[in-house]
Image (cartoon, rainbow, N blue to C red):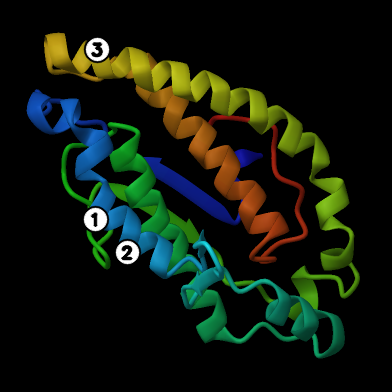
Amino acid sequence: MNESYVLTFSVDYPDRSLDRLTTFFRIFTVIPIAIVAAMVSGATYSYDTATTTTAVVAAGGILFAAPLLMILFRKKYPRWWFDWNRELLRFQSRVGAYLGLLSDQYPSTDEQQYVHLEVDYPNVETDLARGMPLIKWFLAIPHYIVLFFLYIAVFVCVVIAWFAILFTGRYPRSLFDFVVGVGRWHLRVTAYMFILVTDKYPPFSLSE
């Protein structure tokens, strides 16, 4: 069942010694590319002074409202909107994989590198129902709850992996597969709920 889902995600396991120095300082080395990711992800920042509050809104972000309206009223999903959402997910996934210590190769803004994410372009006429985007937020609630606890487990796994890499140079394979599996689960919910490329309910599964 999972193999036929519209989004597939995998990360190449680094079967070698990882860089201990960049692993130790990962929370700092990720900052430059994290800022770039925030700038194309529609992040909003604000800061207060004694007299004013200033907000800075970065351009970009996942295109959600526009595809929703197009599906609802025109039964269309412009290909360039789909391509933007897919490439943004790929970039965010590379940054997330680097932060999660899954590789010591610095994330590229355009090359897929060790992270592989594919999304099938939908045939809107046959694959997407007009009204589904209006209720997917509600249908996906069980996934939100499960993912909340899974990400707590991911945090623990990454901390353990951090120590393991510092002492052995290797990311324990079982922890690696779990972290990647949670990322895959999260991305499939994103494909269903946010980028609206499928009406097929995401599987409750970590596997490919």
Number of dots carrying numbers: 3
Q: Residue at x 52, y 71 (%)?
A: 54
Q: Residue 34, image x and y in percent?
A: 33, 54
Quarter of image, res 143: top right
The single residue placed furthest to the bottom in the displayed view is: 74
Residue bearing mark 3? 163
The amino acid on which the numbered mark 2 sits, given as a three-letter code, is Val
Quarter of image, res 63: bottom right
How far apart, in angstroms, are the residues tagged by discs 2 and 3? Answer: 28 Å
Q: Is residue 145 left or right of residue 205?
A: right
Mark 2 Cα-neighbour bin, 10 Å: few <14, some 14–19, many ≥20:
some
How far apart, in angstroms, are the residues tagged by discs 1 and 3? Answer: 24 Å
Residue nearer the viewer, 61 or 194: 61
Of mark 1 and mark 3, the one earlier in the sequence is 1
Marking on residue 32: 1
Residue 18 visible, this angle: yes
Asked if disc 1 and disc 2 are in contact, CB closer than 8 Å, the reply is yes
Residue nearer the viewer, 1 or 24: 24
Q: What is the secondary structure assignment of the residue under circle 2? A: helix
Q: Residue 173, image x and y in percent?
A: 31, 18
Residue nearer the viewer, 81 or 44: 44
Q: Residue 148, image x and y in percent?
A: 66, 30
The amino acid on which the numbered mark 1 sits, given as a three-letter code, is Pro
Please name which of the two marks, 1 or 3, marks the residue nearer to the observer: 1
Residue bearing mark 2? 36
